[in-house]
Image (cartoon, coloured by chain):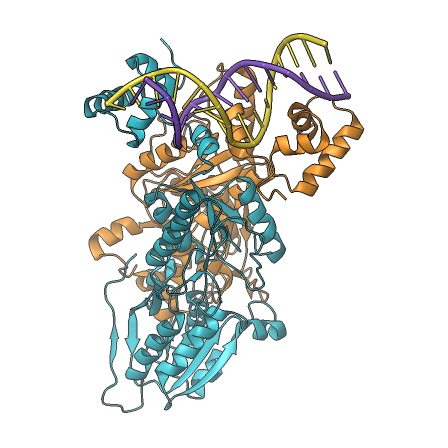
Chain colours: A orange, B cyan, C yellow, D purple
Amino acid sequence: MDRSKPKLSRIAETLGVSVATVSNALSGKGRVSPELVERIRATAAELGYVPSVAGRALRTGRSGVLGLVLPDIANPLFPQIAQAIEHAAASAGYGVLIADSRGETAMQTEAIGRLIERGVDGMVVVPRRGTRIVEASCPVAVIDSPSTPGNTVAADHWEGGRQMGGHLRELGHRNVLLIGHSPASNVQNDRIGGLKSGLGRGAVTETLWIEKLEAAGGAGCPLGLVEKVRSGVTAVATLSDLIALRALTELQGAGIAVPQAVSVSGFDDLIWSSVVTPGLTTMRMDMETVAEIAVAALVDTIEAERRGGEEQKILGPVSAAVPKVPMELVIRHSTGVAGMGLSQARNRTEGELAS
Amino acid sequence: MDRSKPKLSRIAETLGVSVATVSNALSGKGRVSPELVERIRATAAELGYVPSVAGRALRTGRSGVLGLVLPDIANPLFPQIAQAIEHAAASAGYGVLIADSRGETAMQTEAIGRLIERGVDGMVVVPRRGTRIVEASCPVAVIDSPSTPGNTVAADHWEGGRQMGGHLRELGHRNVLLIGHSPASNVQNDRIGGLKSGLGRGAVTETLWIEKLEAAGGAGCPLGLVEKVRSGVTAVATLSDLIALRALTELQGAGIAVPQAVSVSGFDDLIWSSVVTPGLTTMRMDMETVAEIAVAALVDTIEAERRGGEEQKILGPVSAAVPKVPMELVIRHSTGVAGMGLSQARNRTEGELAS
DNA sequence: CTGAAAGCGCTTACAG
DNA sequence: CTGAAAGCGCTTACAG
């Protein structure tokens, strides 16, 4: 009994038909009689036939694999991105090859090169400031702030900021401290812009950039939040849950009650946001949708290339008309301004937190 | 001018030699004269030759790709694992295809199937309780607690627990609360066993399982740590940084000073452990080494299969003699028992925290 | 040291 | 509706 991996020709021999017919039957392409299709399907299943991707790839020129290029897998947002892309790609029948540049811009080019060598049909790139993607000889979808020109798909970070700002304004916050990591980030600038807009004219804001604080105070230095709160800040709106966590524990560690004395909010709904006390109010981006759009655009371009030959080669896969994917406000604690005698001040904490 | 992707035959034509010679020269296999090798190398580079993985895969039967099977990408430990595996695989000349089963055990089989269809040469599996990996028709390396029998590579979780327990004992802690997620986890049981051993006979311990607490109190329910501390617990040793974070904020939120009144420790050195106040003392596993061992074992088996033919087919890649990879204690705050009048009680907090 | 030839497993016009 | 044949790009014995 032949125990080797069954191939197309074995099915053909078993049934006494040609490999062409088997191929056509299995792919549903050629006109094969329904009965034959059925018999071929049955024996293929019986033999445990698994098509050879190598054979198919060599013949068709497509690998059926998409590359996912990440500036740094250690980035806490990565799991969401990877999961969403993997899911969208698998649904579209593609595999996902990962390439990590471990935080170094220079390695990104190299990582992209590795993917090209592996014959990916297209790739999703999560860029870092300074990334150049000219070198890609395949369709590319970029996930980033829409401020970036080109073939980009992104959540609407500005609108997310505006919603968060509006939420804080409604709760009565008029003196808000904004904390971001780096002013060089388009995403963070969008969020800041939205936050200020949402808070409105009546609010006083100050912006802290961790990058700058740490340049002076060293990595992990205190953010000096206690004094800010003492001097009147009632809400700390951070641009990422990681910063929110840092702020939360710095405040709590100094004996300042959150959310009773000051409110802390973040962005991204990272895993720990729901397990800390109090749960962090945050802004979740719809990564599923972002991933679906990116993968669909890639697949469309790949298909078009296949049909259209060399014609529309390295055009970006995402048209300029791509809608910005909305974000969703996740309220885990929401506290009105304390001690200001405002009648509309509210103070409630969500009881049920997801684990 | 021909702009299409150059292949082996184009180099051969350009130089007026045979494709066999070009192939041999580029791979360094056959005996080709040094000068010819040099010329071939040069024109290959000049033409921007990139070998076709499909052609090679079809011919050799190897895809040059390893699969990484994860129970849930959302798991906070995933970035470390993925980064380490990607790095080890890339160094060995392999690509990494990811497969996520999104937390559902049933999907793991399906995910493994997708990888097989894609022709991976081997795979690294991070199992979930209940995972069966019999279905794999390629070499498999499993990353898990060494308690699991089979072809496993893992950090020495028990020893890590013992070190952490010893650390706490030296600081004078004699009444320690242990918190894990689920008693069904081998890894967690190893860590618990090590912790108890490290704390020694003189210590009183109680173990809390979050899974059980939440079955009664609902997801995200308070852990009741305040009472534990009031009744004499001086250290909370958790089995993961995620739990440590939950404990830390629950205590701080209730006005209990950490680490002055109670010490909190974790496991895994997840990203936020260094940014919270106080920084979490934790146990880091050497994922780089775990990944290197797993990938090396896989590659060895793949190579052996190639040479030895069908002989030692689906043997596990990891011999029984694999050393357990050590863990490393990361001390970010370490506080002796407060208010117990012990002369050896220490109280210091690390100043420098990595961001 | 170099080359001619076969073949990995598939798909795709094309002919019947 | 079905089949014979070519060819995707590479590597590997084998012959010279």
Task: Decide which of B243, A332 is in the foreground and name it.
Answer: B243
Task: Decide which of B132, B30 is in the foreground and name it.
Answer: B30
Number of labels in the image equals 0
Instruction: Give the percent coordinates (x, y) of residue C15.
Output: 67, 8
Q: Is residue A239 visible?
A: no
Looking at the rendering, in which quadrant would you find the C terminus of chain A? bottom right
Quick check: A67 above or below B50? below
Q: Within the image, what quadrant is residue B27 found in?
A: top left
Q: Is residue A91 visible?
A: yes
Instruction: Give the percent coordinates (x, y) of residue A110.
Output: 32, 35
Residue drawn at x 31%, y 63% is A227
Residue drawn at x 62%, y 30% is A9
Q: Within the image, what quadrant is residue B134 found in?
A: bottom right
**B158 sits to left or right of B16:** right
Instruction: Give the percent coordinates (x, y) of residue B262.
Output: 37, 79
Q: Within the image, what quadrant is residue A15 found in?
A: top right
**B351 sits to left or right of A55:** left
**B118 sits to left or right of B95:** right
Quick check: A305 above or below A232? above
Residue drawn at x 37%, y 34% is A112
Residue drawn at x 55%, y 34% is A52
Task: Decide which of A113, B267 is in the foreground and name it.
Answer: A113
Quick check: B204 above or below B327? below
Q: Farthest right residue?
A: A35
Instruction: Give the percent coordinates (x, y) of residue A236.
Output: 41, 56
Looking at the rendering, in which quadrant would you find the N terminus of chain A? top right
Task: Decide which of B263, B71 is in the foreground and name it.
Answer: B71
